[in-house]
Image (cartoon, rainbow, N blue to C red):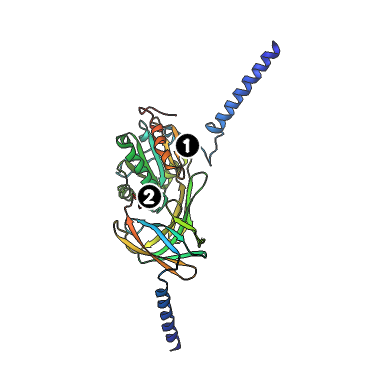
Amino acid sequence: MKSMFQIIVMATLTAMAGLASAGPEGIVVGDPWSRASIGTSRPGVAYMTIRNTGDSAMTLTGLRTEVAAMPQVHRTATDDSGVSSMAPAGDIEIAPAGTVALEPGSLHAMLMKLNRPLIEAESYSLILIFGDGSEVAVTVPVLGVGARGPEE
Amino acid sequence: MRRLTILAAAVVGAVAFTLVLGWWQVDGPGADTARGARPLALSNMDFALTDHEGNDVGPQSLLGQPSLVFFGFTYCPDVCPTTLADISGWLDELGADAGRLNTVFITVDPERDTVAAMAEYVGYFHEAIRGWAGPLLEIERAVAGFRASFEKVPTSDGYTINHTASVFLFDAEGRFVTTIDYHEPREFAVPKIRRAMGADGEGAT
């Protein structure tokens, strides 16, 4: 019985935390976009700029979205001999007044294990999770498979 | 007089030595085989692949027209679609001249990139882009000829492939001209392609 009570309390607290996390003050997301996917077997990708207008550093620790079971920030690096590699980027600190760009060929939100295809002209919600427990929901428009960015 | 002759011979010898040394290191047997090495001429490469329409293709199929070639794989979410989108933009800029350029995307992922997968994928980009696929051994031979590299790396999602992301340019005779590297300013790309194409399509150096 006690465990049931604990579960209810935890669920309630979690729900409250979810409600309270409508967005930490100071995080401003710009130019989000995603490429359409070809089916669901290939990973999707999302790009945006994340600006911290607050007074304290913020750490992006994770992502959550209904469209993919395993969203994760990855970093592409290209070495002196022109070889590109990609690896999980880990936690990303955004200094006060700092901006982190998720952009082609660099940091990007990699959407592994897509639950559904990303279809051009549609959009989906991607939640940025920060180290202080706060979250920011971003509406990401889906551009074409061959898109180069939101301006084009 | 004799002293002058010796001096002249020494100078000529030194110049010749420098030239030979340069050739040895850049194009000759002393050329670096790994980092920064120069790709072979297409006419000296040997590999057999299949294009996205099912035709047998190889380096010899590219001779007669200048060529733009790069490596990638269709499960690559970031660099490959970005490169393909960039190349599509360059081909748009070339306009009708794009038809005088072989533009080839060679997969480094033979397990997942079948001919059918390549056909679907390249269909999303500029129509001039050809997708080449084939068995691992032939892809390894192609990559070796370009002095490129690729490496399969496990991930939590399956695997990814680290690979040379540079775009290679060859003239109509198949001689290597230059590369367009992933991080160089994009406005350099079209002039480089035009250089490989030559003013009237004759080979550039």
The three-letter amino acid code for the residue at tag 2 is Pro
Secondary structure beneath dot 1 equals loop
**Label 2 is found on which chain of the structure?**
B
Q: In 3D space, how far apart are the residues under numbered discs 2 and 1 (Cα atoms)?
A: 24 Å
Q: Say which mark, if any, is on residue B39.
A: 1
**Label 1 is found on which chain of the structure?**
B
Secondary structure beneath dot 2 equals helix
Mark 2, Cα crowd under 10 Å, few <14 / some 14-19 / many 20+, is many
Task: State which quadrant residue A109 falls in.
Answer: bottom left
Disc 2 target residue: B81
Asked whether the residues under the numbered discs 2 and 1 touch, taking CB atoms below 8 Å apart as contact, a structural biologist would say no
Q: Is residue B134 visible?
A: no
Q: Position of residue A73 (x, y in %)?
A: 45, 60
Q: Position of residue A131 (x, y in %)?
A: 49, 68
Q: Judge left or right: residue B55 versus residue A9.
A: left
The three-letter amino acid code for the residue at tag 1 is Pro
Q: Position of residue B22 (x, y in %)?
A: 57, 30
Q: Nearer the viewer, residue A55 or B115?
A: A55
Q: Position of residue B137 (x, y in %)?
A: 43, 45
